[in-house]
Image: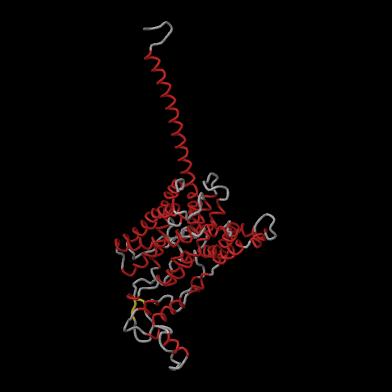
Amino acid sequence: MNWAGSEPMEKRYTVVDFKCCRKMYRYLSELYQNNVNSSGADLLSAIVPLMKLLSLTIIGLVIAHPRTQIIPKATFKLLSKLVFALFLPCLIFTELGESITLESIAQWWFIPVNVLVSTIIGCLLGCLVVAICRPPPEFNRFTIIMTAFGNTGNLPLAVVGSVCHTANNPFGPHCHSRGVAYVSFAQWVAVILVYTLVYHMMEPPLEYYEVVEEGVEIEEQLPVNVNDISRPLLVEAEWPGMEDKETEHSKTPFIARIFNNVSNLSQTSIPDLEHSADGGGNSPRSIRCLAEPRVVRRMRIVAEQTPIRHILQPPTIASLLAIIIGMVPRAKAFFFGYDAPLSFITDSLEILGGAMVPSVMLILGGMLAEGPNDSMLGLRTTIGIIVARLLALPLFGIGIVAAADKLNFIVQGDTMYIFVLLLQYTTPSAILLGAIASLRGYAVREASALLFWQHVFALFSLSLYIVIYFKVMIYI
């Protein structure tokens, strides 16, 4: 029955359904648009900082290119010394000293531990690369080292500085100071590893040397002149004055000669293993040698030849001073704060520290301008190291950091803390490894070529993983 002035029941239901569908469509459209805008904002906040660093690197590449030679290599070497001895220590001291306290040290303990974990996982991946790609036998240790040890200093500082320079960064108002403090707090562990473990692992392989005659030093039999430093910027980039640190045993297989029983090896070239020529059987040295086990004696000799004294470089000294001053509230009040009596000094150091990031990227561009050297490592091994270091290792890093968060090892709610931890798995191999290779006379050209290609592909892998990290940090 149809009452007067009333609409049919089917028509009223149709109108209601249409209004509900229109409201649902509007809601879904707004939700989709918000998600698109949010994703676009996250993408821009992740990509734009790397584009800034890329622009600085391209400028360095152009002004240092052999065809233009606007600025000579000597200027870049001088700039690297300024970064190493002045700009980087100033940045570390001002940012780390202001942020660190006794309480923060107790909260930041996982940062240096994470460096050790990333190195161990990198070593395992390096062994996997050796097993799969099968590089030339003399480069097995080199392959493991280049996969395991990443850049934990200059490049992470540059990435943090560039990310925090963006207005809509997700890390809050104190982004830069916290980021620099976290990165600086991890550097001392990496420096100790480089000057101990890496230094000895990069010694030339014993099987590619031979003794010419008794009492004559070992001569190198590698076909390539590895002592030829064809890329001085690679050597000087993170360790200026490296050539002054060379010793009589730095370019020889010192550990292998001590621990391997080689019948035709000249024992006279190994210090302190036998009785001294001028001392009799009753001399203090001979008594000490008789009382000391042979293995312990050999370990002591290796420890004496370890350049542990070189750990106290300007950046490390700046980190120690910042930690000491930061832990003492009264000393900290003299240097940091608007009313601090010595605030003019820290302000001056902060101005100098601001030149670190652009200088580092210009030096990197100058290094890349020289192009890759010829390498005997092989294309398959080179690709394997790049994939393991830049693509596989960050995936393990996400799992490690997520597990550490579940175990309450990291500072809760601090996204910059998480970002720095993830960044330690993402950077290419440390440029300092090129300096160590030159110091030891081992795989210099291979290190040069591999570092070149890693930094080229790191532009893409860093972009990819920073976008992923910005998404992942929400759930960690």
Position of the N terminus, as image quadrant, is top left
Residue positioned 56% across, 63% down in the render:
319
| Extreme residue in the top direction | 4
- Residue nearer the viewer, 208 or 32: 32
At which x and y percent is residue 412? 50, 51
Nearer to me, 7 or 237: 7
The answer to whether 376 appears left or right of 83 in the picture is left
Vertical comparison of 122 with 213: above or below: above
User: 388 or 55, which lies in front?
Assistant: 388
- Residue 413 visible? The answer is yes
The image position of residue 168, as x and y in percent, is 53, 44
Q: How is the image coloured?
A: secondary structure
Measuring from the top left, give residue 318's x and y in whole percent.
57, 64
Query: What is the quadrant of residue 262 in the picture?
Result: bottom left
**411 shown above or below 324:** above
**470 left or right, relative to 322:** left
Is residue 449 something one can see in this rendering?
no
Q: Which residue is drawn at 43% across and 24% down?
A: 22
The quarter of the displayed image where residue 81 is located: bottom right
Q: How many marks?
A: 0
- List x then y, in percent, for residue 92: 56, 60
Residue closest to the eye, 242 or 55: 242
